[in-house]
């Protein structure tokens, strides 16, 4: 449904939708696999969160296309991850924006929180384990260069949250 909802749109701010969806499907698939081991009762919710975790990028591209194009340029100039460039330009990132949208659409709190915090999982969150799974899947798929939002060349193993890896009992080289 989300693909169909956004399908007729063309990028206004220089965003590659095909690579975006490849990344999203990759994150959803890896999230499901990790969840089956580390949070089996929430596999489907984590899969949905993985599929939708970056939808905020589409919103920024469609609603604030000039500023989003500036964000992409800043990302490449600064060699930073896109969410950090968004925070610089918009004073919020795509994940926080997506949480607002999904809360408005009455998505479950678990999905909203996992999406909002997937770049920096909070150990104090009641959904920390699920967010850690989504975070590890997102960074892992970026490192594997499966799809992307334009910042794959700037991702490093050091971008894994140590707290998230510890929560799942993983090492960077998994």
Image (tube, rainbow, N blue to C red):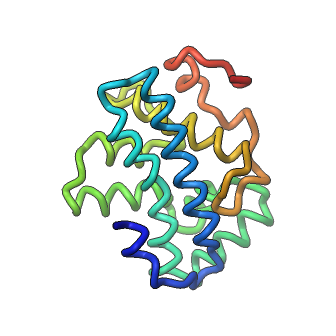
Residue in view at x 35 percent, y 55 percent: 99
Name the residue nearer the viewer: 42 or 96: 42
Q: Percent x, y for residue 33? A: 50, 32
33 sits to left or right of 161 = left
Picture quadrant where residue 68 is located: bottom right
**Where's the C terminus, which quadrant?**
top right
Using the image, determine if residue 161 lies above or below residue 112: above
Q: Estimate the x, y position of residue 161 in percent, counting from the top left.
A: 59, 30
85 relative to 59, above or below: above
Picture residue at 38% right of the left edge, 66% below the top? 2
| Picture residue at 68% right of the left edge, 51% below the top | 146
The x, y position of residue 159, in whole percent, is: 68, 37
- Residue sitting at the far left: 106
In the visual, does 171 lie left or right of 97? right
Please tell me which residue is depicted at 22% across the width and 62% down the height of the picture. Answer: 105
Q: Which quadrant, please, contains the N terminus? A: bottom left
Question: In the rendered image, which quarter is residue 79 located in?
Answer: bottom right
**Against 2, is 79 above or below?**
above
Figure check: 18 above or below 78? below
Query: How many marks do you count on the picture?
Result: 0
Percent x, y for residue 96?
A: 41, 55
Instruction: List the single residue furthest toward the top.
Output: 169
């Amino acid at each position: 449904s989300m693909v169909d909802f956004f399908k007729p749109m063309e990028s206004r701010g220089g965003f590659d939708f095909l690579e975006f969806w490849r990344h999203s499907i990759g994150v959803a698939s890896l999230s499901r696999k990790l969840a089956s081991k580390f949070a089996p009762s929430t596999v489907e919710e984590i899969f949905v969160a993985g599929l939708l975790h970056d939808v905020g990028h589409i919103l920024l591209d469609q609603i604030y296309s000039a500023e989003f194009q500036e964000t992409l340029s800043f990302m490449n100039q600064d060699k930073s991850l896109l969410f950090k460039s968004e925070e610089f330009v918009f004073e919020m990132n795509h994940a926080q924006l997506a949480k607002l949208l999904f809360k408005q659409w009455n998505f479950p709190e678990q999905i909203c929180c996992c999406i909002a915090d997937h770049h920096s999982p909070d150990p104090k969150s009641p959904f920390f384990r699920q967010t850690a799974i989504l975070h590890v899947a997102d960074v892992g798929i970026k490192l594997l260069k499966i799809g992307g939002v334009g910042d794959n060349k700037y991702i490093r193993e050091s971008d894994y949250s140590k707290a998230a890896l510890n929560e799942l009992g993983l090492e960077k080289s998994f």
